[in-house]
Amino acid sequence: MNLNTKERTVYLAEKLAGEGDLSDGELLELIRDRNGASAERLRQLAGEVRDRVYGRKIYIRGLIEFTNYCRNNCYYCGIRRENEHAQRYRLSEEEILECCREGYGLGFRTFVLQGGEDPWYSQDRLEHLVRAIRREFPDCAITLSVGERSRESYEALFAAGADRYLLRHETAVKSHYEMLHPREMSFDHRMQCLRDLKDIGYQTGCGMMVQSPGQTLEDLVADLRFMKEFRPHMIGIGPFLSHKDTPFRDEKSGTAELTVYLLSIIRLMLPQVLLPATTALGTAEEGGRKLGVLAGANVVMPNLSPAGVRKKYMLYDNKLSGGSEAAEHLDLLKKEMGSIGFAVAVDRGDSLMDSGEDDKEE
Ligand code: SAH
């Protein structure tokens, strides 16, 4: 690495911090020529922005993985329909409410219900579930992450009391999307779902896998461009990690290094976005979640599912669910975050992202 490349990438990091954006060509350069000096500079600048907007607070979400049945067959995912080795389970409404009660006692004020696209959880059952949580926990945010549904379905779930929705776009490039998913799935439909969710009024989260098979650096620039324009309230990114019972079993996994670098870039492009240090990041590298927070993230989502099912929601090999990933070990998480100067907040932790309609064209 010669000095000029280092100087150039550090300059680009500073320009990004100053202007909140770069041209696509500059973003590509910043990613392609990344090095220790540019990573360090991005980390400092993104940390300052996060501290200024949100303070040194970590927002927590209790993640309830309530079903691993799925009608989809995404090539990367361990709970894909055709994985016959997956031990399937689904939690009942009462079991889910029990998770929420435990979480509430621990200090969680957001519950994230994530699952495969499980037809048993029909519209009626999902609405019933959301209403039951809303009734019992009026001061909590309810986040859904149950995949692609119709606009009418999203509207009814919103009316039932859901506040937020996570639907990663996975990749912003159609041809790449088609390398990751079978033909029965549609890039255009996923993007339409995201637009509908935001339009209905959900605090909406998108995000991509980092270094998924076939992804180019140009594809990552397209992800950044899409997110900058879409202005989601939340962005979840994590490295692709291979799973032994999927078509991508032999594909190379992504790294914490690039994921953390992208977290800093995202923080600088969208200062007000809520940005989790994800479980996949923690799985890719020991201490990965701390690195994510130091690079500009401000959310973690400990696992609030019943202990007996945690190992069954295996999206990728070796997915962490113990230690400070476990909701009941919030003390460990507090210690971990305390050691790098952050306090865990007991708070809904709503996004400060404005809805963006008025200043979109600024
Ligand atoms: N069915 C829901 C939830 C999917 S699981 C939905 O469609 O939104 C949540 C996220 O886990 C996915 O969006 C994907 O980005 C991530 N994921 C799945 N398999 C993965 C893998 N092998 N490596 C890394 N992340 C993975």
Image (cartoon, rainbow, N blue to C red):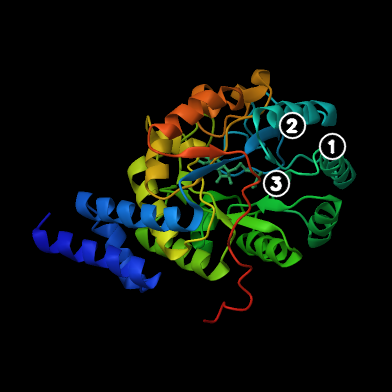
Q: Amino acid at mark 2?
A: Cys
Residue 253 to residue 51: above or below: above
Residue closest to the eye, 146 or 72: 146
Q: Amino acid at mark 3?
A: Thr
Q: CB atoms at circles 2 and 1 under 8 Å apart?
A: yes
Per the image, label 1 sits on a secondary structure element best described as: helix
Please tell me which of labels 1 and 3 falls first in the chain.
1
Q: Is residue 318 visible?
A: no
Going 69% across and 22% down the picture, which residue do you hit? 306
At x 86% / y 41%, what residue is drawn? 135
Nearest the eye: 263 or 149: 263
Residue positioned 35% across, 51% down in the render: 261
Q: Residue furthest top?
A: 308
Which of 234/245 is in front? 234
The answer to whether residue 82 is visible is yes
Query: Counting residues from the N terminus, which is met first, the one under dot 2 or under dot 3?
Result: 2
Q: Earlier in the sequence, mark 2 or mark 1?
A: 2
For residue 27, side relative to residue 223 (left or right): left
